[in-house]
Image (tube, rainbow, N blue to C red):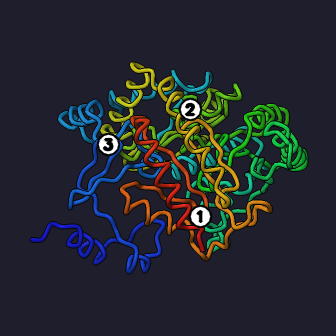
Amino acid sequence: MRTDNAAYVERDLAHVWHPCTQMKDHEHVPLIPIRRGEGAWLEDFEGKRYLDAISSWWVNLFGHAHPRINAAVRAQLERLEQVILAGFTHEPVIRLSEALTAVAPAGLTRCFYADNGSSAVEVAVKMSFHYWRNVGRGAKRRFITLSNSYHGETLGALAVGNVDLYKDIYKPLLMDVITVPSPDCYEREPGESWAEHTRRKFALMEAALARHAHETAAVILEPLVQCAGGMRMYDPVYLTLLREACDRHEVHLIADEIAVGFGRTGTMFACEQAGIRPDLMCLSKGLTAGYLPLSAVLTSEPVYAAFYDEYVKLNAFLHSHSFTGNPLACSAALACLEIFRSEDVLGRNRALSAHLGERARTLQDHPHVAEVRQRGMIVAAELVRDKATREPYPWQQRRGLTLYRHALARGVLLRPVGNVVYFMPPYVVTPEEIDLMVEVAREGIELATCA
């Protein structure tokens, strides 16, 4: 049997339907079959290596095939692979819950587990709605969300997001939400600081809360970075103001830290940069360092208490997943948190992010790069047709695809979001590897914008 790349591609295309993909593209865009990974690198079946500059869709924290996480999963596999979490428990889920509540913002003391980020958002949305019903305020059933936000692609998560590419076709199936303009600082006025712009935009959220608080269960947002919306960023002051307003208007705050948690923005959780605690915090992706599907919603004792009652009251939260709190996934997550505990990950990241930012900011000189922006280990460059007016390229031209294909040819995995090229590497990346990914991006930008 052939074992080269082409053989695997042929077998794949006969049966596999890939996510977030127009499958017809693979008639001319090569599918890359990966044989193994090590550190920040992936390797195909013909031995070509690819620098994983996007952490395999933002999930990988400490590189591929990390020996400590490998060992933890391997050891757990010999003891217990899965058990129902209704009426049963196991050591990994207990230890993980203790560890998560120890590192989370103070007051988040309860952990509810699911399988992925979208499912965590579903849990948080249902939990908030159900809380208000349980405390006798059933009119509070709507949600406020930001424009350009993304929270996943199951129907509830899709409803509270606002990226049209994913949402438009399914709108007839979705609940109605209240949308407030994003504080996205790419839209700031000339000479306006990030904080000034963010404060000005918060007035729109304040007005929405004043008008709709009586019918609103929660505000949901991605703290500091709207990742799938093009890595758009805003100032932490928005979170500070929002926490105060949600308290004043008696509305929950749901922080979707799925993509930005576990050190991506420079702190363990993005909410820390505003010194706030959300009422519900959604975690996934980096939770297991990218090893296994797992998500968690952390919440407080007051929320938990609203569901704690006699069975006949029918106040219990009956949401469930078959693999909730899977022992293998919990073991990977515990190993991930142990690396944070035993190593100065955030300190090392500060040095790496400084180098990444310094190198990436040189892209700002390109005549078709409108902005280079950064929050911790996330850096993005916005490609535009006209730098003076910031006129975007038409999305139909797929300029980012040209960059993506060039980067693959040069051995770097970059996957632009539309016309935004970004870097979100694993934390084991070296300065030399950062230099490579930025240089390849520079070449790709030149190719993508030359015509």
Using the image as rendered, state which of residue 65 and residue 161 is in the foreground: 65
Q: Is residue 338 above or below residue 359?
A: above
Which numbered disc, 2 or 1, marks the residue that appears first in the sequence?
Answer: 2
Q: Secondary structure at mark 1?
A: loop
Using the image as rendered, state which of residue 26 and residue 257 is in the foreground: 26
Residue behind mark 3: 64
The spot of residue 236 in percent (x, y) is 73, 34
The spot of residue 121 in percent (x, y) is 58, 49
Which numbered disc, 3 or 2, marks the residue that appears first in the sequence?
Answer: 3
- Residue at 31% over, 51% down: 42
Question: What amino acid is labelled 3 in the image?
Answer: His
Residue 155 image-quadrant placement: bottom right
Q: What number is the disc on residue 418?
A: 1
In space, the residues marked 3 and 1 are separated at their CA atoms by 26 Å
In space, the residues marked 3 and 2 are separated at their CA atoms by 23 Å
Q: Is residue 251 above or below residue 102?
A: below
Q: Is residue 381 left or right of residue 10?
A: right
- Mark 2: few/some/many CA within 10 Å (<14, 14-19, 20+): some
Residue behind mark 2: 354
Q: Secondary structure at mark 2?
A: helix
Q: Nearer the viewer, mark 3 or mark 2?
A: 2
